Every structure is written in C-alpha cells, then in structure tokens.
Amino acid sequence: MAAQFGRRVVKGAATTAVAAVAVAALSASQAPGVTDTAQGRQNTGSQPSSDPDADNSATGNSPYYTDLPPLNSPTPTPTTGTGTPTGTGEAEAGIPATVLDAYKKAEAALGESKPGCNLPWQLLAAIGKVESGQARGGRVDANGTTITPILGPVLNGNGFARITDTDGGAYDGDTTHDRAVGPMQFIPSTWEWSGRDGNGDGKKDPNNIYDAALAAGGYLCRFGWDLSDKADLRRAILSYNNSTHYLNTVLSWLEYYRKGTHEVPDGTGTLPSGRSDDNNGSSSSPTPTPTPPGTTPPSSQNPGGGGSTSPSPKPPTTTPPPSTPPTTPATPTDTVDHLEDAGTAKLTATAGDAFAEKIATRTETEAGKAVAKVRVRFTIVGDTDSVFTGGESVATVVTNSSGVATAPALKAGEKTGDFTVRATVVGRAVSGLDYKATVTARQADALARTGDTALTCVAGGEFADQVELKATYKGAAADGVAATATLIKAADDATANDKGPYFKDADGKTVRTLAGLKTDANGLLKLPKLYADDTAGTFLLRINTTGGATLTVELKVTAAPSSSPSPSAS
C-alpha cells in the first residue's frame, strides 16, 4: 500500500451498501448538485491524479475524507448537550462545541459583510467534516486553536499538485514545498490573501477554527456568488477542491447537517476513516515532514488534507529505497523568467465606480515565450479602499494558453489618488510588475435649483425656503459629489461676506461658508436653513462642486418695517 500513497486513487462513493443507500436517500431529498446513477450510487466523476490547476484551489486539491453521512437523518437536539448521543446517526450529527460555535459566528459575520452571499453555517460544517473531520473531532483549545497541527501532504508533484514553497515554512513548516494547513486546509498562498481574524485576537492563524471558518466563508463568498443558488453553490465548492467526488461528498454532508445537528464536547466528535488517497480504506504513511516552528510535533503525523491521523511510519519493506532521490519534472512555474504587461490600458476611475480596464499580465520564459498554467497574484498596494470584484485586495489567477493572467475588475473606493496593483508569480522569485491606478473625485458638470421660488427674507428673520440643488454629470444624476456653499461679497468677488444672510453651525454660531457638503444618491443637495442679519439688500450664495459645476443663487433681504410712534398724550 505504501507504494500507492499519493497516487490520488479515488475511493468510490459507495464503498459499502450503507454509503450507497445514504447517497440515494440524500439525492431523493434533492440535495443540490448530487447526481445518481441508475443503480442509486453517487456519480463522482473522475478525479485527476495530477491536476495542473489544482494549486489554484483553496486546498491545492489535497486529499479529503470520503465518508458519507449515515442512512438515518439526525434528530435536532438542544445545543447544550453534555455528551455524545447514542446511535450512529446521532453521533455523526454531533459537532464539537467550539467548532460549531466558530461556524455559526462565521455565518453571522458574513451575513453582515456579504448578505447577498447567503452563506449557511452548515456548508462550513460540511467542508470542515470533509477536510479535517471537524478539527479531528474537536481537538482544539479554549481559543479554538488545534492541539496539534493538521497538515496536508507535501505538494511536491508526486501524485498531487506541485506547489513550491510560498511562505518560507511559516505556516506549514516546509521551506521547499507547500502543504495544506489547519482545520479548513488552506494552502499558504491562499491563506496569505484569504486569511481572517475570526476570534479578535489580532492574528490570522490557519490553525485556529474561528479564523479558518471565517476565511473559508469569505473564500466561498467571493466573486459575488449567491450560495442559495445551486449553480453558484457548486462553483464555490469546486473552487475549494476541484473534484466532482469532493463536490458530491460536501453536498451530502450539507444536506445531512441541514436536517439537524447538536453540539458535543470538544474532543469527542466522531472521526472519519476513508480518504480520497486511500484505495481500500486502509491508512498510508507519508514521509515525515517538518513541523511548524514553535509547535509540538504531533504524536501521529497527519498525511493529508482530510486532516486524519495515521500510524507512525513503518520500517522499510524488503524493497530498498532508491540510491538517489527521483527527480521531479519542472513545472510551468519553474520556467518563468519575467512578467510582461499584456496591453493594460490606463487605469482611471471615478470614486465608487468600476474601472473600465482590467489588468493583464503575461508570464514569459527568458526567451520571451509565453508560459501557461502559472499562478499570478495581484495585490493592491497603497493607501486606498479600492478592491477587486468580491471585496478582496488580493486575487490569484492562472495564466491561459497565451500565458496571460487577467485580474478581476477593480472597483474604486472613496479615497482619491494613486495606488498600485502589483503582479507577482506564486512560487517563483521573479521581479513583480507594478500597475498605477488612479481614483478621481466624483464630479458634476451642472448644478440647478429644484425649485424657482424667490428667496426673500426680512432683516433679522429667517428664509422660509431652504435652497435645494441637483447635480448632474453628462446628464445623469451625480451622487456623492463634494460641494462647498459660500455667501460671497459680489459676483466677481468670491470672498465670504461679512454681513447679510448666514448659516448656523451646530453651536448656533454664524457661518457663511459650508464645506464638506455632498450630494445624495439622487444627486440632490439640500442646504441648511438661512438666516438674515439686520442688513437689507441683495446678496449672493455660490455653490461649487468637484468637476467644475457652479451655481450662484440670489438672496433678497428687505428692511424690517419701522415701528409707528405712539400717539402723544393730549
């Protein structure tokens, strides 16, 4: 069996009669995306032994648990249970308390930050079950950090994707190749941009279930996916691990957990047994690999992305090891010498708008030949709130057959000015390529009053009507445009007047210039109430916006009527 380890041999979805019946029952309940054959067995499709795009998934397409839910559906019980319920179905429905809490907190957080995603915590539970058996049955400390590291296999191209080291061993303890890390099995290069601080301790730790669950939710919610939509749900799950068998296994657990779950004490959760790199359900032992700095080596090394534990490596059999290590063939990434711009136009957008142009970068060999199937990471750098589609500041894209990686569309934030998008090759130390992007202020090219009532007031009184304006840009309402209103001395003198009409500040003091005004979503701007001092005459109010729109409004103040003298006493 040792000779077969890492060949990505798929364990069939129906390894037992119980598993086959379970899938048929789940499909009958219309679990989205689960497909059946005529015999009622799960149609897993084929799983590649060396998928060239595997390193573009969250897990690097590392192995995972293939166990299916039991035939009987779980019965919901209070979440304050004190032990593991009896019965296979009930035990499988139990989720360790801290792990369950992390999933629910992640759902709540994504419900606020990305409500359109409709992320159910049961999906995180399904992925957590398949990736690590719910953090090895809930073997986490009080803060949610795994007692021992959960590490996937070395992604060295030997039956898995080949991903050379991207983190200097910081997360996985391996300075040569990457490995999936933690209860949700993120590869380091994905964690670098998708990592989150889910427990508020100021750190983003892939070994912490709160951090990992929130990161997994954010990963599944990118690209504007709506997980209540079956097609988007399938896309999101496949982006986590690109395998039809993986998809159907996760969907089976999702449907199972939706029917009811309960919490069990940490460390008492049931552990899966079958794994996708296990031909007949028996364990395989990988070559020992480094343990992350500052951690205690686990008593039994975890060989794969499924997060299972395995026995200590056995002594060699009668077949001696090769005298020289086998050479690993070069990957496309190994041949990249430099990056070239692939025709990116000038990157300029108005605050709040999408950039019309996308960044395109080409990976090339030293001879200038394009290199396909290379991961290019685009990172937004600088003091900006601009983001890529989906709200992320980092995006990783695989080059196409022409060697070109096109970044997701950029969306300008409200901060104006320049920032940089840096393109780098994941897993290859070549110089990055910087792209300058500019965000300009929202603009208006026309201003007009929404009414035509004359603005008059008696000296010492207040104007009955407030000044309301509408700003437009190229005929369309100009929302969010900055404006300034000033009571000026004359048409040719924009200096603030020292007499006549005035506004009041929050303290009731006289002010004749209002800065920091902004039009609403419909391009409307309503100025505060105006007052008049005891000076009669005609005065001017001038409003200016970014973009050059200007409007001057006339204000008239009439003298207060004089008091009639009292009749003389006769």
Image: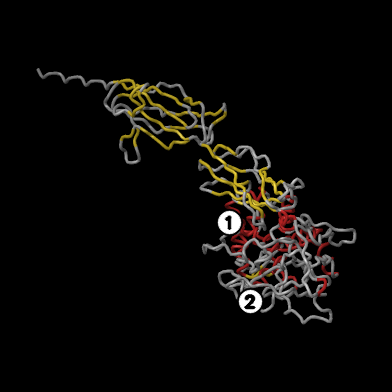
- Type of amino acid under label 2: Pro
Where residue 420 sits in the image (x, y, percent)? 56, 46
Circle 1 residues within 10 Å: few <14, some 14–19, many ≥20: some
Instruction: Residue lying at the far left in this picture: please name it.
Output: 570
At label 1, the amino acid type is Ala
State the image coordinates of residue 453 (x, y, percent, origin top left): 43, 22
x and y, in percent, of residue 59 in the image: 70, 61
- Residue that appears at 78% across and 69% down: 326
Give the number of the mark in front: 2 or 1: 2
Q: Dot 1 lies on which element?
A: helix
Residue 181, compared with residue 515, is above or below; it is: below
Q: Quadrant of the C terminus?
A: top left
Count of residue discs: 2
Q: Please identify the quarter of the rendering in which residue 174 is found.
A: bottom right
- How far apart, in angstroms, are the residues tagged by discs 2 and 1? 33 Å
Percent of width and height locating residue 236: 71, 54
Q: Which numbered disc, 2 or 1, marks the residue that appears first in the sequence?
A: 1
- Color style of the picture: secondary structure
SS of the residue under disc 2: loop
Identify the disc placed on residue 403: none
Q: Nearer the viewer, residue 296 or 538?
A: 296
Direction from residue 160 to residue 108 in the image, left or right: left
On the picture, is 364 further left or further right than 479?
A: right
| Visible residue check, residue 264 | no
**Quadrant hosting residue 191:** bottom right
Task: Say few, some or many: other residues with alpha carbon within 10 Å of mark 2 (under 14 / 14 to 19 / 20 or more).
Answer: few
The quarter of the displayed image where residue 323 is located: bottom right
- Label 2: which residue? 297
Residue 99 visible in rendering: yes
Question: Residue beneath label 1, please?
Answer: 109
Q: Nearer the viewer, residue 302 or 404?
A: 404
